[in-house]
Image (cartoon, rainbow, N blue to C red):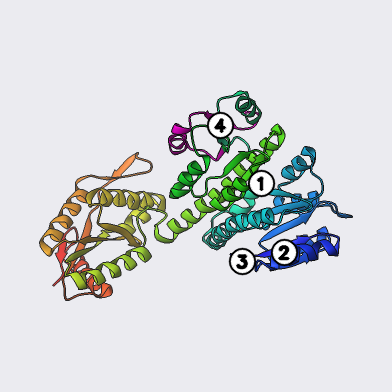
Amino acid sequence: MTARILVVDDLFTNIKLLEARLTAEYFTVISAMSGPQALDICEKDDCDIVLLDVMMPGMDGFEVCQRLKSSPSTAHLPVVMVTALDSPADRLKGLQAGADDFLTKPINEVALLTRVRSLVRLKHLTDELRARSLNAQTLGLPDPLTIAAAEDGKNGRVLLIDNPDNAVERMRVALMQTHKVEIETNPAEAMTSVQEGDYEVVVISLALQAADPLRLISQIRAQDRFRNLPILILAEPTDEPRILRTLDMGINDYLIRPIDRNELLARVSTQVRKKRYQDRLKDNLTASMELAIVDPLTKLHNRRYFQSHLAALLAQGHTRGVIASLMVIDIDHFKSVNDTYGHDAGDEVLRECANRLRSAVRGVDVVARFGGEEFVLLMPDTDAAAGQHVAERIRISMEREGFPIHQGRQAINLTVSIGVATAGEGLKNGDALFKMADEALYRAKKSGRNRVMMAA
């Protein structure tokens, strides 16, 4: 997995040293020797991950990181601080600025490459979501990047899986300052707790007794719904081989004992913030997909979805001999509703008509608003006789009961006209089938409305 890595350092020799290590692993290396230069490169979306020196003249690494993480266009960029500073206070300051990790000079090459690969995997996933989410703004959705960049990572739902001792209680107390925390001290029940809880971060100790923590991590990552659930591990100073292995398995972060409470809190908050960032992108993607195929007024499928579904069904029917019936439904004299009672009342009528259609069909049927006051219903595995029977049932349901308008304070009587066409083995053209049903609808209208007509 390759990536573009920005190395930021005011010393040219440090840049060349990192460049040699990274290019040997087929990464593309970009360099900057100041904070403003680094910000400019990141704003242009010219890199996938930032290796950032802390001690630089003018704008130090902490300020650069804070600016990157507070901007909607760069908040998603992973930032690893590379520094000779290794005190808990320095790490905490970096984490509060938004850093994803720290590498201490002299840099451990294995740790560097493993951490870079782990963050690049996450970045590629986020990039895909961001691209789709940005495209969705053309549909009128709010910008999720601006909202996500303002996320503070507080009130997270955290599961802490560790041995039952005083240390786990101290960690719980520390996390409770900002988050909602549950503790699981029985490794045999840990996976059940993950599955049943709606957690935003899971913290797992590598010192678990009577269970293999790496096995637990693999079980979590094996399930699709937890592929992107942030996992933070607690390790001993001698656990480096297992830390590197868990990074390859997809964990998000780690802490070395003895645990600094403030650092624990900062790292968990960072993971909560990332989780919510991705969740918001996914929600926006889901909403954009819904807008593309759903009519916003009636919440039925729209014309675009119906036409693609009809084409697919008829193509399938052509090979399997499947029979399908299509009906086109039009509300009689609908223009007079808008003229007499107003367009708000007309919208209420359309929503009520959609509800009645929805309740009259099977799960396999597709009902859609085709445009204006016209609806379509596609019924797979339905012959002409059955199609006519369903159409007559729908016509009666529309005529029998008045349509509420003005928020239920009034009801008006309306009827519908319906044209029905049936496709067998010989018809695989959706436009031709629709034209047959539409012509039957025209004959129903010409014959006095409030009736069902079958295609010739």
Q: Amino acid at mark 4?
A: Asp
- Locate the N terminus by quadrant: bottom right
The region drawn magenta spans 176-203
Whether residue 346 is in magenta: the answer is: no
Quarter of image, res 7: bottom right
Residue 176 placement (x, y as % from top left):
62, 28
Q: Secondary structure at mark 4?
A: loop
* First along the sequence among labels 1 and 3: 3
Q: Earlier in the sequence, mark 2 or mark 3?
A: 3
Q: CA distance from mark 2 to mark 3?
A: 14 Å
Question: With 183 as the anchor, is 63 left or right in this view?
Answer: right
In terms of sequence position, does the residue under pointer 1 or pointer 2 come before the other? 2
Q: Earlier in the sequence, mark 4 or mark 1?
A: 1
Q: Do the residues under discs 1 and 3 have CB atoms within 8 angstroms?
A: no
Label 2, secondary structure: give it.
helix
Query: Of the numbered discs in the image, which one, if any, rests on residue 2?
Result: 3
Give the alpha-carbon distance from disc 1 to disc 3, as whole Å. 30 Å
Reading the image, the residue beneath label 2 is 21
Q: Are marks 4 and 3 in contact (CB under 8 Å)?
A: no
Residue 434 visible in rendering: no
The kind of residue tagged 1 is: Ala
310 in relation to 281, above or below? below
Q: Mark 4 highlights which residue?
A: 162
392 or 63, which lies in front? 63
Q: CA distance from mark 4 to mark 3?
A: 35 Å
